Image (cartoon, rainbow, N blue to C red):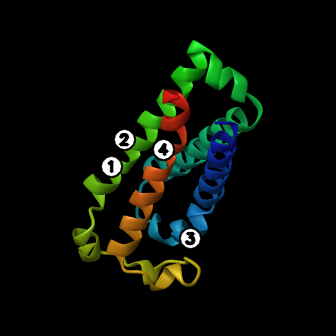
Amino acid sequence: MDLILVAGGIYHIGWAIFDSAWPKLWDWKRRLSQLDDFNRGLLYILSRLLVLLYLYIATLSFFFQDELLNSVIGKTVLIFVVIYWTFRAFMQVQFYGFSRADNMNIKVKDVNLPPPINRFSNRALSIVFFMIMLVGILLYLLPALF
């Protein structure tokens, strides 16, 4: 299970890096310019809090494996991470869907994603994100159960 938690830590570092790049990748300076100061600032705040959360989960996964696996509070943290990624996966479907993602008013090719990702359809990228979130669920569900 230690190796699975290390993989979970790497997984969350990957999300922290990705989420910290959101403003550049999604061209927030231009795309959010129509929002009022409050809502624009709120998006930056929330994205930074996600980075902090992901780094916290990664830290726990790397350095507190025994506590995560062998204590009630550790199991609670593992279950929280499972619930978090389960909700996030459902929200991916709710807000972006799969086939309906191609009908959104922004296309993957219109943002600053690197090749070959920038050649994906919105549907393909939404499916990829959903599958990546399922990996996050499994990385913490397995240690929580066994």
Q: Amino acid at mark 1?
A: Met
Badge 2 is on which residue?
87
Q: Secondary structure at mark 3?
A: helix
Q: Amino acid at mark 4?
A: Leu
Q: Nearer the viewer, mark 3 or mark 2?
A: 2
Mark 1–mark 2 distance (CA, rounded to whole Å) = 6 Å
Q: Is residue 33 left or right of residue 9?
A: left
Q: How many marks?
A: 4
Mark 3–mark 2 distance (CA, rounded to whole Å) = 24 Å
Q: What is the number of the mark on residue 138?
A: 4
Q: Amino acid at mark 3?
A: Leu
Mark 4–mark 2 distance (CA, rounded to whole Å) = 14 Å
Q: Amino acid at mark 2?
A: Phe
The residue under the point 52% across, 49% down is 41
Q: Nearer the viewer, mark 4 or mark 2?
A: 4
Choose the circle earlier in sequence order: 1 or 3: 3
Q: Secondary structure at mark 1?
A: helix
Give whichever of 53, 10 is nearer the camera: 10
Q: Secondary structure at mark 2?
A: helix
For residue 127, which quarter of the picture? bottom left
Badge 1 is on which residue?
91
The residue under the point 28% across, 70% down is 101
Give whichever of 4, 40 is nearer the camera: 4
Q: What is the number of the mark on residue 25?
A: 3
Give whichever of 112, 74 is nearer the camera: 74
The residue under the point 55% across, 67% down is 29
Choose the circle earlier in sequence order: 3 or 2: 3
Mark 4–mark 3 distance (CA, rounded to whole Å) = 27 Å
Q: Are marks 1 and 2 in contact (CB under 8 Å)?
A: yes
Q: Where residue 53 appears, x then y in whole percent?
A: 60, 38
How would you rate the neighbour count of disc 2 (Cα within 10 Å): few for under 14, some for 14-19, many for 20 or more? Answer: few
Choose the circle earlier in sequence order: 4 or 3: 3
